[in-house]
Image: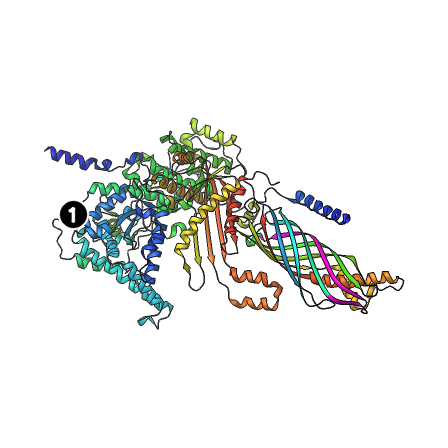
Amino acid sequence: MHFRISLIFFIVFSGSVFGQDFDNYQPIVSSGTLPEDFTRAVSEAAKEAKNEPSDEREFTVSAAYSLNRIMLGGKVLFNDPMSQFANKVTDELLKNNPTLRSKVRIYVIKSSSVNAFATPEGAIFINIGLLAQLENEAQLAFILAHELIHVDKKHSLDHFKKGVEISRGRGAYRDLNKYEKGLAEYAFSKEKEQEADELGFLEIYDKSKYSYTAISGVFDILKYGYLPVDEIPFDNIFFQNDGFVFPKSYKLSELNPINVEDEKDDEESTHPALPIRKEVLEKLIKNRSDEGRSKHIIGQSEFITIRNMARFELCRMQLLDEDYNNAIFNAYIMLKEFPDNKYLLKVIGHSLYWLSFNNTNLGKSFYKNIEGESQQLAFLLYKLTSKQKDIDMVSTAFATKLKMLFPEDKDIDLLFKESVKHIVKEHDFKVSDFYSVYMNSKKDSIIFTKTEDKKEVSEGNEGKSKYEKIASSKNTKNNPLMAGEASDSLNFHKYALAPYIDNVLLKAAFKDAHDAKPEKYVAKNKRSSVNSAKDRNYGKAVGGVERVLVVNPYYSGTREGKKKKISYLKNEREETDLVQRIEECGKAAGIETDIIEPKLFSNNDVELYNDMVLLNEWLIERMIAGNALPEDNSSPVTVLGYDRLQKIGQAHGTTNAMWAVSMFEKRTRGLGIIVPMIVIPPLMPILIHRVINGGSVSHFLAVVYDIKTGELKLSHQHTTYDNNYGFVKNNNIYFVFHQLKQKDKK
Amino acid sequence: MKKYIQFYITVFSLYLVSVSLFAQRSAPGYMGKRFVLKYDQGISWSLGGDAQPMPNLHYGIQAEYTITTSKTLGLDYSFMPRYYKNRVLFGNSIYLQNFFTHRIGINAKLFRRKAGNIAPTGMFSQVGLNLFFINGQHYNTVIDSKFSHLTFDIGPSIGAGKQYIVGKNLMISVDVKLTLPLIAIANGIGAEAGGGPFGNSDLTETQQLKKDLNRKVSWPSGQANILVMKIGFGGVL
């Protein structure tokens, strides 16, 4: 009896036991020690592959380089609850195959796409986008089994060898043209994918205790991966408040159905068509009994917790991808289960803010091709962004609502104040410009009911999975009940702040925004071209910077031409060299540099790794902010945790963060240039230089942001038509530091 | 001698004034170093006319200061000797033995920003103004004595080249310079026309000789300075 009570207790509360308090959700970070995959250099792999045949050695080095890039790119999670769960599922699958288990490592990767992949070294990556769409643990197990076969049977190496054979026209491929060779490669790839499906099932999945029926719909996850995580009606009322309703024209009466047709043509695809894969799997599952098997072995509640985590992360990732429709819709879906959840509301609030801040006009193509329930939201966003005041006010009203709900949250406070600042800057609005009465008190005729009276149309979909709803929704009309409809003439945006008009915080925010006397805003479509602005900013002194945090400097070198090639070992050396030069140039300019370089991480540097990840995400957010030039507007608003960012700044002793990318393309010239050298000998020095240089190009890009204000302090892009000489690299880097240091022009 | 020293000091002072007027603190130079000092080794070929077909070696030094991100201002000096074996000038009685051309010039280099060059490194084009002092040394067989005389020239120049940095601050440069020594060219044209604008029957024999010597020396010197290819070694400071 006690055991049963304990078990029930355990099952009911295991959601919180497995780590996440969704009410105070914090984005997932890595923990523990850095796995060896992070710290292993490409040169080590090259040493180990010394005795392999040259093609295989090249493959090993290129694979090590690719893995290195993935691991140090800042998107991989380790020792987090999701990766731990995936590892437990793998343990379960490979209970009887410790040899294979010792070869593989499972990581979750911060990507919104629905995918999983394996590398030849045995690292398997599961995208968060995939985890968010799963229906059960067994589906994850099948996907892992598929990837495990890729590793076990060395499919990557086979693919590489076959690719070499085909491209060199050996044997049966001798008489093929380029297109036919491409098809041959696709065919081979499909063969391996089919093998992974079949052997993954027979050699791994079948030997576990996972259910057969649970995976019958696994390919639907890939098929419908472009849709949000669930199909529920979207109600515009979500963005309304007691003060206003949207006009009638802001909703669609009919939505695009979800395309359920199966595409069987896979000639130009690396994977077999999904219907074919599904058929093969169904044949394998047929006549197999589910007795003694289960959809969940680790635990259903743990699976649901993990999936919810993935969905929470997914919303934020989609926001950073500027996929606002999916970010908002997925957060909206999750709010059904987690009402008034601060994290989810913040994602929505930030999505609206960036649409507003960037004067985005989404255009008809934004919503026209969207399928399913999320089209309703897409249409609403399209309508709101077609009038700047509409999106600005809806965004500000939403931010104000969040401020009322969570007055102590720093990120929300920033969002709220910046939203007010934005509408003051854009429209010179004052509090008195808004109606303090609610829309329904006006004499224009509208149909209005209070939000509490709204009933949602459920269409009998409770308890159904997303894929069951899709299957049953063919050709059905979606006509959700709206709580209110107004005429277009009512200028609803003027009522948007009605519920808050007398609020002290709102009045204070307006006052501060007006007192700050914001600089004249230059709309993106009105400012001068990027090129001329770059020229104006070239050499422009920023001034007074003493210390800079340099985040993950990146180098890429390629050889262009007929045989485009990357020299992996050289790239690794050049990246190390880049770090040293940054340090030297900083010193020469009188600026201290603190460089976060993942190649120099030790196993205990997980905090530094997390700092790097956060800063890289913050940089992406700056790109969303659209401030590509120092003269653009900046905003400190961040969904990533303002306080956490400031702590990073304090830990590194500066608020100036710099990202630097160095790229080099080696190009060869023909020898025709020798003729002018003979005809006009005095030109010889210049032409000799041209022959040596070969038209190579070096690019250097650097941006420096203030992590406190979000201001872009410096944007530097420099292209040199020269070889990758040391002095060229030094010039480019030093120039950036020089601009940061200089105060005066004369 | 004193006059020449005064002259060089004047030119150098003018150069320093120009630098301080035009230099911008925002110019980064190379790793913060804006001053370049180098030795230039030049070579040129005399081009027909009176000159003997031989390579001419130019030995020079150059000082350069980075005034903006794309420009430098330079002062340079070079010395070109030429040695003859019995180079007949006038009816077997006077032989040209040597002449020495001293050239001092001010130049401005422009580093192409669009090609990604930052002064003082990378590809550049240049313009300059040059002053030549040509010291000719002669042997008079009639009176068995040596004598010398000095002539002058002036001319603008244009050029192009590239400056590299090797190591921390060692500079290597290659460039080609085209100069128009104006007086030499006029003299050359005059020489071809058999006396030309410099012929004057009112001059004394000594004066006429001096004029002829000027012409006969400046033209070969000028030719040797028209097109010069240089390689330089120095450092950034």
Disc 1 is placed on an element classified as loop
Q: Nearer the viewer, residue B202 or A703?
A: B202
Indicate yes or no whether the magenta region holds residue B100: yes
| Nearer to me, A367 or B160 | B160
Residue A188: x and y in percent read 29, 64
Give the residue at mark 1: A294
Q: Nearer the viewer, residue B74 or A615?
A: B74
Q: Is residue A440 above or below residue A133?
A: above
Q: Residue at x 75, y 63 (%)?
A: B97
A623 falls in the magenta region:
no
Q: How many marks?
A: 1
Image quarter of the C terminus of chain A: top right
**Residue A154 place in picture, x, y as percent:** 26, 58
List the single residue furthest toward the left.
Answer: A1
Residue A339 visible within the image: yes
The answer to whether A305 appears left or right of B107 in the picture is left
Which residues are the magenta region?
A: B85-112
Amino acid type of the residue tagged 1 in the rendering: Ser
Q: Main secondary structure of the magenta part?
A: strand
Quadrant for residue B212, please give it. bottom right
Q: Tell me where residue A186 sits by quadrant.
A: bottom left
